[in-house]
Image (cartoon, rainbow, N blue to C red):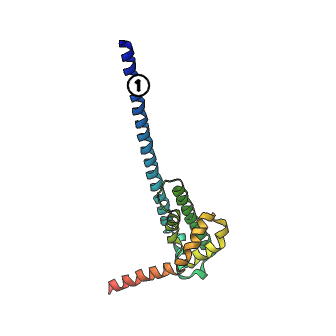
Amino acid sequence: MKSEIVSRWLGVGANFGVLLGLFLLWTEISQNKQMTRVELGAGQVSFVQQNWLGATTGTLSEALSVAIYEPEKLTKRQLVALDHYMRNTVAAGIRVSYLVRMGVFDLDSDVAVWTSMRPAMGNQFAHSWFSANRSNIPPQISSVIDRHLSDISPNRDRQRLDQIEASLGALSQ
């Protein structure tokens, strides 16, 4: 009788231990999932920053300047640099789309993709590049660009930079 009671209590204790172990495992999995989201989010920010920083290098910076102010004067070398810049921008859109689909980011996929691509789309070269490369871009990305590109003037970058320049000129007076 005594051994039966001890056996029941040991069974209850073992079941409690199993439940506690499952709870701890669930907690650890939740924490790992959150850490993965944080790491992938930070990786996305880093990816976008590298793309922006790449635009400050000599060749690409010069190419973007010509693309914004005198697109008809782009050299072959500048066209190649801009082509790779745009491919990297599309890669950023593909990456963020994937992260949204995998549940890493709780965002609308279209908004996330367009937010990552919009900064590169404000000049005539970008509009022309997309038109020439539409068929080589994954459909989930090209459809987002198709829906939003008309919202951005091919002169947006020029207008923005001219406004900044004018503002700086007004400050010096």
Q: Image quadrant of residue 10?
A: top left
Foreground of the two, 107 or 68? 107
Residue found 57% across the figure and 79% down from its top: 124
SS label for mark 1: helix
Q: Residue at x 50, y 63 (%)?
A: 108
Q: Position of residue 101 (x, y in %)?
A: 54, 56
Quadrant where the N terminus lies? top left
The residue identified by callout 1 is 14
Q: Residue furthest right?
A: 135
Instruction: Give the image location of residue 109, x and y in percent.
Output: 52, 62
Residue type at mark 1?
Ala
Q: Nearer the viewer, residue 165 or 62?
A: 165
- Where 106 sits versus 22, above or below? below
Residue 12 pos. (x, y %): 39, 25
Residue 94 placement (x, y as % from top left):
57, 61
Q: Dividing the image into 4 quarters, which one contains the C terminus?
A: bottom left
